Image (spheres, rainbow, N blue to C red):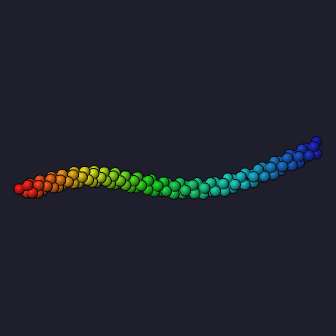
Amino acid sequence: ELLVTRNELGLAWLEAAQHQAALSSASESAAADRRAISAAETVASGRVADLECDLGAARVALAQLRSRDASFRNELQDHTKAFSDAMEARRGHELCEAENSLQGKELRALQQRVAASDAAKQGEEAYAKREV
């Protein structure tokens, strides 16, 4: 009976040693997993920092683009106003030229009528002098 108990005790110690080895292996595996998780967290933290930096740069670039867009819009508005003013001035100038041209034509026609009237008068006077 003592021999059986010793055998059982030996088997129990062997089984306990196996469990201890399995526990030690699981503990080492868990430690390796923790190290891998820590390394992954470090990498992820670095990537988050990089992404935050990229996001900040993108926000600055967007602000610059918005500023340029506003500047271009203002410049376009200024050029549009200047073009509109120039076209209005041109229309006014063309209108003045048309009026001057019309007045010039009327003046020439009047001058031609006066000259014709003067010529007719001189002709009448010359005819009257001949008869006298």
Could you say where residue 128 lies in the image, as x and y percent from the top left?
A: 8, 54
Q: Is residue 99 left or right of residue 41?
A: left
Q: Residue 48, located in which quarter of the rendered image?
A: bottom right
Q: Residue furthest front?
A: 131
Could you say where residue 91 lies in the image, as x and y percent from the top left?
A: 30, 51
Image quadrant in which the C terminus is located:
bottom left
Residue 68 visible somewhere in the drawing: yes
- Picture layout, residue 28 above or below residue 4: below
Image quadrant in which the N terminus is located:
top right
Q: Is residue 80 left or right of residue 12?
A: left
Q: Is residue 30 left or right of residue 45?
A: right
In depth, the one of 17 and 69 nearer the eye is 69
- Picture layout, residue 67 above or below residue 12: below
In depth, the one of 113 and 49 nearer the eye is 113
Q: Is residue 37 left or right of residue 54?
A: right
In depth, the one of 64 and 128 nearer the eye is 128
Could you say where residue 84 lies in the image, as x and y percent from the top left?
A: 34, 51
Residue 67 visible somewhere in the drawing: no
